[in-house]
Image (cartoon, helix red, strand yellow):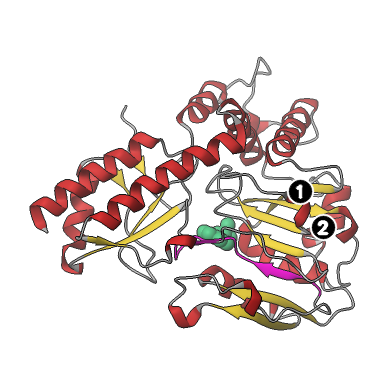
Amino acid sequence: MSRAYNFCAGPATLPESVLRQARDEMLDWRGTGMSVMEMSHRSKDFVQIADAAEKDLRELAGVSDDYAVLFMQGGASSQFSTIPLNLLGEKSSADYVNTGIWSKKAIAEARRYSTVNVVASSEESGFTTIPDQSSWQTSADAAYLHYTPNETIGGLEYDFVPESPGVPLVADMSSTMLSRPVDVSKFGVIYAGAQKNIGPSGLVVVIIRKDLLGKARKETPTMMNYQVIADNGSMYNTPATYSWYLAGLVFKWLKEQGGVKAMGEINLRKARKLYDFIDTNEFYANPIDPRFRSWMNVPFTLADDALNGDFLKGAGDRGLLNLAGHRSVGGMRASIYNAMPEEGVDALIAYMTEFAKERG
Ligand SMILES: Cc1ncc(COP(=O)(O)O)c(C=O)c1O
């Protein structure tokens, strides 16, 4: 068996040791005679798996008892409506920062429930930078301030946590969660689709300050009501048990790697290597303001778009997969999440060097 280097933005590569463990435990989880997939979510064994995953996540991300950790379903996109339904309360508006395609999707969904103030936008620059915070038109009357710390498609990442004017700060951390240390206490809500740094798609992890629970609008679907999910230990209905289990294995793996701080150092090194190469080779380009280049998603273009197909084919022949950019932007994109080994980045750079020499 040979494993490719999979640069997909999500579902993304998972740590090989996690997949091996899942394989070894597939038919018989620790002498129970059954797969985790077959267990009742109310069973002692599964509750133990679920509790351990939450405990490890709390430890990794530094989540205090002031916060509830929820393992929900429907991906990060379902949170685009869950957030306003739960947080608007009596307020009629929410503040959003627009830095790319995922911000826009969150904004569009929130507009179904409230007035949305786009307090800052980098659309005019083609989403290549983050607007300076001094220019943000935030309001102390807003129900919350929402932003997207890492725009997965554009490859644009904040290098700071915004100040909110006394309203809860809400962050879509789908593609940056657990990739570097973050001070959770600055946030009202953090949510993240699992399929990048956490586990299989469908699962979405929500970290919510407990005082924000219990404010859902009357018409909020039960399955989207944070209070209901929190009160039921994320088991109001049958949770995504296998994804939860796999997320737990990823958390254990992360702890073995030295946790989020160590991971952040590795991720910075991987990203720097790739950006340095792109910047010094005339055949490749990345349009993002260097200060805000994503550590996780590295988009790049070739000097001649007509060579894109050949580039991708040659990459595929070498086991470097899923490098095509998002269909909305084209070009290339290398997603280098926690589970992408540094050797994968080295192999990509070696191939890019060779391709530029031969075809550039
Ligand atoms: C930043 C961000 N937000 C939201 C989503 C949507 O996630 P899902 O497909 O789990 O709904 C993605 C998916 O790639 C993302 O990158």
Amino acid type shown at disc 2 = Tyr
The single residue placed furthest to the top in the displayed view is: 31
| Residue 103 horizontal/vertical position (percent) | 58, 71
Q: Reply yes or no: does residue 287 show up in magenta.
A: no
**Relative to 181, residue 34 above or below:** above
List x then y, in percent, for residue 60. 68, 36
Magenta stretch: includes residue 150: yes
Residue extending furthest toward the left:
358
CA–CA distance between discs 2 and 1?
8 Å
Q: Could you classify mark 1 by the number of other residues whose Cα lies within 10 Å: few (under 14), some (14-19), or many (20 or more)?
A: many
Residue 234 percent across, percent down from the top left: 79, 46
Using the rendered view, name the quadrant where residue 154 is placed.
Answer: bottom left
Q: Are marks 2 and 1 in contact (CB under 8 Å)?
A: yes
Identify the amino acid type marked 1.
Answer: Leu
The kind of secondary structure element at disc 1 is strand
Q: Does 54 sit above or below residue 193?
A: above
The residue that mark 1 highlights is: 70
Q: Residue at x 65, y 75 (%)?
A: 134
Q: In the picture provided, is 37 more to the left or to the right than 59?
A: left
Q: Secondary structure at mark 2?
A: helix
Nearer the observer, 282 or 307: 282
Residue bearing mark 2: 226
The span shown in magenta is 143-157
Query: How far across and how far down the image is residue 100, in percent?
Result: 51, 72
Q: Quadrant of the C terminus?
A: bottom left
Seen at 60% across and 38% down, the residue is: 260
Residue at x 30% of width, y 65% of height: 331
Can see residue 291?
yes
